[in-house]
Each structure stands twice: as structure tokens, then as C-alpha cells.
Amino acid sequence: MWLTQPLTERSTRIFLGSLLLALLLVTLLHLAVPEGHPLHFSAYTVNLLGKYLSYALLAVAVDLVWGYLGILSLGHGAFFALGGYAMGMYLMRQIGDRGVYGNPDLPDFMVFLNWDSLPWYWLGFDMAWFAFAMVLLAPGLLALVFGFLAFRSRVTGVYLSIITQALTFALMLAFFRNEMGFGGNNGLTDFREILGFDLRTDATRLGLFIASGIALGLGYWLCRAVINSKLGRVCIASRDAEARVRFLGYRVERVQLFVFVLSAMLAGVAGALYVPQVGIINPSEFSPIFSIEIVIWVALGGRATLYGAVIGALLVNYAKSYFTGVMPDAWLFALGALFVLVTVFLPKGIAGLLSWRRKNRTETEEAAA
Amino acid sequence: MRRLFACLCIWMAVGWVGPTLAETGSPDRDTQGQQLLEALDVRSYVDKSQAINQLIASNHPRTRYWLSALLDGRLQRTDQGHFVVVVNNRGRNWPVEDALSGEGLGEMSRRDLDRIGINNALRNQLRSALAVVDLYSSQVDQRLASAERLLGEVDADLEDVISNLQAKEENSQVKKRLAQALAIYQLEEKGDLQAIEILQGSLHSRVRVALNRAVTGDDPELAQEARLALNSIQQKLKINDMAETLYFGLSLGSVLVLAAIGLAITFGVMGVINMAHGELIMLGAYTTWAMQQLFPGQPGLALVLSIPAGFMVSALVGIAIERSVIQFLKGRPLETLLATFGISLILQQLVRTVISPQNRTVITPEWMSGSLVVNDALSLTLNRLYVLAFALVVFALLIFIMKRTRLGLEVRAVTQNRAMARSMGIRANRVDMLTFGLGSGVAGLAGVALSQLTNVGPNLGQNYIIDSFMVVVFGGVGNLWGTLVAGMSLGVINQVLEPWAGAVLAKILVLVFIILFIQKRPRGLFPQKGRAAGD
């Protein structure tokens, strides 16, 4: 079966195993080790790690299109943010009449704008199942329309990168407008609870962390299964020689569209997990610089490996948290230098380093034998 | 306490010295002025009225000053018989100025001063006199400004004076304005049909007000005529509005072209994705700022000098980027994109750390501020006009370089077939370096121009990078003319959309339009043909 096939792979077993181990370890260190002990993980740390894990899922989504489809999307932040907004709208509706203005139906910012009823696109977001479906559907639909147009007319390479960037830029401008009904500049915030659990309790935070970890594991598994399937083979082939695959009779644009939409949905899930953990979603998630930052996570970790994307996302975001705390001015220098150094000196990323060492070792063993 | 004491001392000193100064006075007193003022200080209001007319006719340079002082009751006479103008009549001691010379005389006690009184009739006369006094001036622009103020302000008292002046006026513009001012009066007071003829075609808002009133008035014939005149004016206004939109559109377009034209060379011709292009624009803008710091008080000179300086700074930085990073990433466009994006982050942060995260102000020289008045409804801001012209000049120069010089020939040869060009003895790497330097330098020029239109800050470049790429892709990669047409048309489209969609929505619509356009024509408006097309 194509779904269980990844488990026969050594890298997938190692990745999923270490992810499970990490989840258990963090949970144990958070719950069992008393506070004040150097090994104790505070709720804050758990929350931070949960955020990193949702970023890691986003990076996996980007790696799926960039690494295996050869499409450098500079607009994946848009899908991430759309998933985030869908979740944010659900969380806004959960506030109910506990907002500043105490309106049972309208979120605070709408009362502030003197709106008297919910816009039609807010309807249904009080139901969790609907909102969670929209987490997948909203980014998926955008990717479907955009991808359909782009792949059909064979827009590829740099052109595609630039128009994905324009897409997220246009969405950012749109979401900044108050008239859009998504809270404008301030976005959606002041969330209270999710599925009945209070968002400010440590237990909910731990739960969200574990959910992010599970989502990452499942997403990774799904991506790996798709890549190892026949469709994945066509996908890789079209990355390396698109015209040739076309002449072999494959409908390349359909394969591309399928993978692109899948990746957008994964990004949407990542966004939906991210929002309750940071407690806010605003249009800055649409900014082109964020989308391009995701790409550098993948580039640092190593393209077309999936686990490389996870490593890159965790490393860069840990570095970002560390630097912005210690020397805020240095962070952009470091990030900029990272972009340059990785692309010039480390084209295969950290994963490339690992496999290069392994290859060397096997070669020396073979030589010895 | 100490300060209060100091104030007291000064006050006492002035109180004593002031009158003494006034007594001595300056030796070369303005005798004509003195006589004119003496004539005002009479008991009979009839004589005063004549004196005022005399004063207006005298064309004395201080006439306006005296008349307004007289109207406010600030023209006064000291016990010694000197004329002074009270600057501020609060409290017991008033600061005064010599009426003839205008120099400050310190403070005087109100008891030492006598006001030159006026009645209501004189007050009216003075108000009208003030309205027309500038019409006696020998300077045309003063007369013109005064005539403009009179539109809709003419009353029965002024009518004769103005029609006399209008008959005598030599400057045709002033004459026309005065005729319009009189016509508005005649239309409103007398319902004169001929007045409409004079007002025909004028775009001034006061004229429209008067005609509108006539349309709603009682006289049906007059209303009909006025409606016709008003309609033709509305037509004219519409054309003017369109011209204005076009001008703003072309101005925005020229900014886009300037920002994109360098990219059209590095991205379009060389195929290098330079995400740091915006930061090269920013460096050009900061060079302008730095030059103005080097030449304080001479913003014009500094601006002219920053054209070569901005070009050099950005070109050198561009060449450094090309040598240190881009040449190692040849044939890997996506990696080039990422690496240059990293450079853009570093450059931005460098400016933030070294100069300041805040915006810097770049001064607009005098000859660039103000606007070119075409007619009453349309005036073009000069700085935008200059930028528009600058963009066209830069574009023409680039076309010249690419089509008519050795460098342009080599660039085209290297981009069409690198191996062949090298075997013909062209040093391809050197050509790469120079081309990239040229494109970057042009970005610097764009920065110099932009410093006159927007804020100069670390984020300046970021705001233009996406737009620039859009313009190049829309116009057709590798085609300089395409960039010009694309930039200008996007600018105009944006301005046309703006009134009914709002600035942000217009921008979004333009972006969506381009995204859809690229789906339809992936190679832009003017795709390259033949060998240059590559694949």
C-alpha cells in the first residue's frame, strides 16, 4: 500500500521515531519534573516549541513544492495565513459576549466599525467542524485557482516565483483594509478558548504542542507517501525534465496542480495550529518577507529531503528567538548572511552535509573491503 | 524672579529711550509719505476720504500697510507729531513701529498716542481700497493676484474704479481677470446677458458659483444662457480632470519606469534576479541625502551632484554584489534570488544601524518646488514634471547605450550566445560585471529622483521591488521599450482606478490584473523574438 510504504524507509522511521520521542520527552519534562529544576520545561518553552513545530510543518509544505516540484513559491505565507485566519475567525466567534463591547454575535472590531451584522463570509465559523474544514478549503481553493491558471499556461521558474510573491503582497494589502472585515491592521486577537478549553491554561498549551507534533508527523508521512508513489515519481521527473515527461504522455500540469494544492492545505493546517499558540493573526503573516524566510529554512535544512526542512525551520527559528532577544540589530544581518552563505556554499543544506558524510563513509568501507 | 527684574529693566529703558528716538528720527525722512499721512490727520471725514483716494493714487510702496493699519485703528500719531503703527494694542504700553520706515520703536504709553479715527463710511471705502490697491502696483504678478481676489468681491463702490483700471490695464491676463470680476458683478446685480459671454469658458470656481446662481435665478432667458455657459465649462473641466489624471498617471508611471529600468537590464537582459535592486534604489536616495549634508544651504547643487554620485555609489555596490556572490550562482536563478534577497536584508539593516532607522528629510530645491499653472483648474507640480523628464532622459540614454555603443553590442552578444561571444574575443565576465554595474547605477539614479517624491528611509527599496518586477515582467523580459510602455500604462491604470476604488484597492486590482495577464501572455506585452528569445 502506498500509505504504509514510507514506513519501510529508514529515514522516515528515524524521523517519526525521533519526533515521537521528542514529544514524549517534552511532555515528561514539563509535567513530571518539578518547577525550578534545570531540566524543567516551562509552559512558555512548550508553547514556543509548539510554534516551531507548526513552522516546521509549513517548511515541509514548501519543501514539497520546491524540492520535488521545482516550483519556488514565494507566496506560501499566504496559504499559511489563510489557514490562520480561518482558525482565527473560529476563535473570534468563540469569544461570544465576553468581548469589550459584550456583543454576542459581532467581534469587537466590527462593533467598533459600527457594523450591525456579520458579513456573509463569517457565517458558519462558530461551528468548529466548519472552521476546520475551511482551514483546508480556503488555502486549497486559492491554490487550485492560482495553480490551475499558472500551470495551464506553463508559467514556470522565476516568473512563477514573482507572481506568487505578488499574490501574497496583494493579499496583504487587501487584509490591511478595514473594509475587508478581518480586523484590518490589528488582525484577530484576544482569543479565549478552543473547543471549550481555555487557551491560557498550561494544559491547553501542552495539548496544542502535542497536536502540532502529531500534525507534523502526519504531514511528513503523507508527503513522503505521495513522493514515493507513482505520482511522486512523475513529479520528480517533471522537475528535472518537464518537456520530456510531457512528451512521454503525462499531464504534467495536473500532477503539479495536485501537489501544489496539497502543499497549500498543509500550509493552511500549519497556520491554523500556529494561531491559537501565538494568540494573534494579522496581515503581516502575508508579507512577502515572511514567505521568503520560509524558503531559507528549507534551503538551510536541505531541499528535497523533507526532514531537512524540519531541521532548517527549527534551527532558524530558534536562532531568531535567541538573536532577537540578545542582539535585535544583529538578527537581520545574520539572516541575510545565512541566505548568502547557504546558497553559495551549502547548496544542499545541512541534509546534504549529512548524506555527504554517509556517502564518504560507505565509500571508504567499500574501498577497505 | 531674576527674569522678571530683567524684563522690568528693559521695559523702563525702552519707555525712556523710545520717545527720544522718535524725536530725533532719521535725517532723510520720507517727505512724500509724511505729507500723505498728514493729509489723513484732519477732522473732516470728507477730507479724510479724499486723502485716502490721494494715497491710493500715489502708488507709495507702503500704501497697503498704512491703509490696513488705518482700518484697524492702529495708525496713530504721537504727541510729537510722528506717525506710528501700533503693533499690539494690549495692555497699557504698546509696541510701535515708525509708520514711515517700519522700524520698531519699542513700547510707548497709550496716553502719548492719538488714534486717527474713521467712521463706517470710511471703513467701507478702506475695505474696497485695500481690495484694489495692489492693482496700482507696477508688478504684473501682484496685479494678477489682486485681480484674482476680486472675483466675486466686486460691489457698487468698486465697479467704477475697476472698470477704469480695466480699461487702462496693459497686461492681457490681468485685463481678462478684471473683466471677469466685473462680469460676475454685472451678472449677479444687473442680470446682464453680455456678462455671460465674458464668463464663458472660464474655469475659476467663483465663475461657476455665479453662473450656478444665475441658473437658479428668476430670469428664464438668463438662466438658459447661464446653463449653456456652465455646460461648456463642465465639458472643459472634464477634459482638465482627464488631463490631470493622465499627468498623475504618467508621473507614477515615470517612477515605476525609473525603478524598473535598471531591473530591465539586470533581470531582463542578463537574466539575473536581483532582489537587492530596491536597496540599490535606497542607496541612491541616501546618497542625495548625504550630498545635501555635504553642501548645506545649497540643495539644488547637491541634487545635481548626486546624480553622478548616486549612480557611482549604486553601481559600485552592484559590481561588488556581482563579483562576490552572483557570478558564482550563474545558471541557478532561484538561488540567485535567495542570495540577493539576503543581501537586501543586510543592506537595509546596515543603513538602519549606520545612519538611522528613522526617515531622513531630503530638501527640494526652490526651482523644483511649486507648480506649473496651466489654467484655473489644472496645475502641474514641478517636482513630478522634473522626475518625468528625468525618467525619459535616463531611458533614452539607456537605449542609446544598448543599441549604439560597444558595451551594448557586447551585452547583447553575451546574452544571446555566451560561448560564441567568448570565442569572438569578448570578455564575457567583464561584460557581466559592467552590465550589472550599469543596471545598479540606474537604480541609484532612480533613488535620486525618488528622494524628491517620497520619504527616504531604510524601507524605501522594499516598497518598489515587487512593483519593479511586475513592470518588467508585464512589459516583456529583455525589452526596454516594453518596460517603458508597461510602467507608464500601469501608472495611468492605477490613477484611473483610484478615484472609484481607493488607493489600496487600485493597487490590488493592478496586481491581480498583472497576475492574470501573465497567465494569458507569459512573455509579457512585447515578447522577444528570434535568437534573443533564448529557448
Image (cartoon, rainbow, N blue to C red):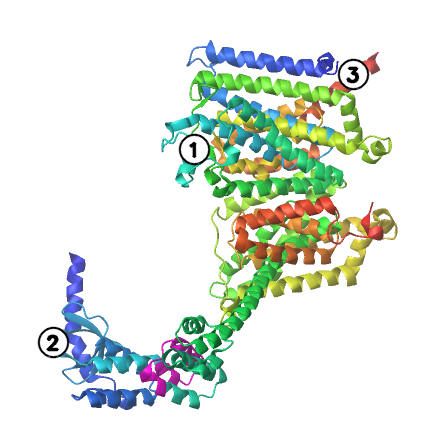
- Measuring from the top left, give residue A362's x and y in whole percent: 78, 16
Nearer the observer, A109 or B59: A109
At a point 47% along the width and 18% down the height, the residue shown is: A204
Nearer the observer, A264 or A162: A264
A30 drawn magenta: no
- Measuring from the top left, give residue B535's x and y in whole percent: 83, 45
Q: Which residue is mark 1?
A: A107
Q: Which residue is mark 3?
A: A362
Badge 2 amino acid: Arg
Please state the extent of the stretch shown in magenta in the rendering: B132-160
Considering every residue shown, the one lying at the far left of the view is: B111
Badge 1 amino acid: Pro
- Measuring from the top left, give residue A31's x and y in whole percent: 46, 11
Q: Are marks 3 and 1 in contact (CB under 8 Å)?
A: no
Cα distance in 3D space between marks 2 and 1:
70 Å
Circle 3: is it few (<14), some (14-19), or many (20+) Cα within 10 Å?
few
Q: Secondary structure at mark 1?
A: loop
- Identify the chain of the residue marked 3, using the numbered disc in the image: A
Helix, strand or loop: magenta stretch: helix
Which of the two marks, 3 or 2, is nearer to us in this view?
2
Q: Secondary structure at mark 3?
A: helix
Tag 3 and tag 2 share a subunit: no
Considering every residue shown, the one lying at the far top of the view is: A32
Q: Quadrant of the C terminus of chain A?
A: top right
B146 drawn magenta: yes
Badge 3 amino acid: Thr
Question: Compared with residue A155, is residue A257 higher up or lower down, i.e. above or below?
Answer: above
Q: Quadrant of the N terminus of chain A?
A: top right
Circle 2: is it few (<14), some (14-19), or many (20+) Cα within 10 Å?
few
At a point 80% along the width and 55% down the height, the residue shown is: B410
Question: Compared with residue A113, is residue A207 higher up or lower down, i.e. above or below?
Answer: above
- Identify the chain of the residue marked 2, using the numbered disc in the image: B
